[in-house]
Amino acid sequence: MLSWPKRIFAVLAGLGLAAAGLWAGFLWDLSITRYLYDPVSPFALWAEAAGWWPLYMPLGLLGFVLAASCKKNVRTLKGGFAFAGSLLFLLLGLAVLILPACHYLEKRAVPFTGGVMPFLFVGAAFFIAVLLALFCRIKPGNLVRLRAYALLGVGFIILENIAVNLMKWIWQRARFDDMLQTGSFDAFTSWLSAPGSGGSSFPSGHTAAASALILCVFFVILFPSCKKEGEKLLFTGYIYALAVGFGRMMMGRHFLSDTIAAILVVTALTVLLWALPPVRKALKKAAQRARQLDGPPPPDPGRENAAPPAGEET
């Protein structure tokens, strides 16, 4: 775990890199995307089809946790309906991931998606059954933690979509590939010009959705074992978001400044949630409830075998 001086340095370094990226975008946005443009690249296809999944995964996670929580009462009528409803919610969460991914691949003329789409749902149903079987063994305390995280994620889906789409409506920046199809880049505007000539390039919705992976920083509140891994989780989230942003530039759907702005927006929203007392209070309450369900911690063998302090009777 980083010390406070190192944390401050990391934050300042990140802001400096973001500022440099926005400045580079202001100067060379069009040139950079022209150089990277490769819409048939497997990496670009992956970034478009599935790179955005982190934002919407809490939908399936919530249904998953609710189904696991209903397992004890599944034999009752009320419990059975609750279990069936949670399974439908889980299927909805999976459909939100699978159907748009198939649409993006078909849009890029990847031929295998249409024929195997039914098999994807059959495989998803089998996957759900396996996961539920595994979840029947999960500790009740961890179910409480995951439910709190899933609810936070579902709320973040709404907040992120409002912020990103509002910015798209304000900026109205033309996309690279749309201008490429017209054969003219006269509609190009810098990210400092708002509104633009019409479009939805700024900021990158895919990159913003990928940046939602940094929400895992809230694990440090819910899961005590993750306290020392907070910086690693955050770093992994940013690397993933940058990778998806790179793929979006390769696809010709966004510019460098679009992707940097998307990461900054999600970072600001995450900081806002972290700073809101009701959010922190709710997460800490869930963590406290989870610790109660976990029971007392196991005894430390090393402490039991340790010699008693001086003056203490054995």
Image (tube, grey):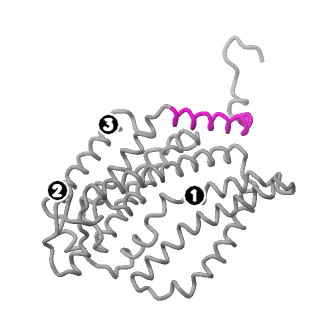
**Between 129 and 8, which is closer to the camera in this rendering?**
129
Using the image, determine if residue 189 lies above or below residue 292.
below
In this rendering, is residue 58 above or below 201? above
Which percent across, then down, holds residue 121?
63, 76
70 and 236: which is toward the camera:
70
Q: Earlier in the sequence, mark 3 or mark 2?
A: 3
| Labels 2 and 1: the sequence-earlier one | 1
Per the image, the residue denoted by label 2 is: 193
| SS for dot 1 | helix
Question: Which is more foreground, mark 2 or mark 1?
Answer: 2
Q: Is residue 2 left or right of residue 194?
A: right
> Cα distance, mark 2 to mark 1?
36 Å
Give the percent coordinates (x, y) of residue 111: 46, 88
Tag 2, which secondary structure?
Answer: loop
Q: Which residues are magenta?
A: 278-301
Query: To which residue does mark 3 refer?
Result: 8
**Labelled pair 3, 2 in contact (Cβ < 8 Å):** no
Of badges 3 and 1, nearer the viewer stands: 1
Residue type at mark 1 is Leu
Q: Residue at x 62, y 82 (%)?
A: 118
- The reply, left or right, for residue 29 in relation to residue 287 is left
Instruction: Give the crowd class for mark 2: few <14, some 14-19, many >=20 residues within 10 Å.
Output: few
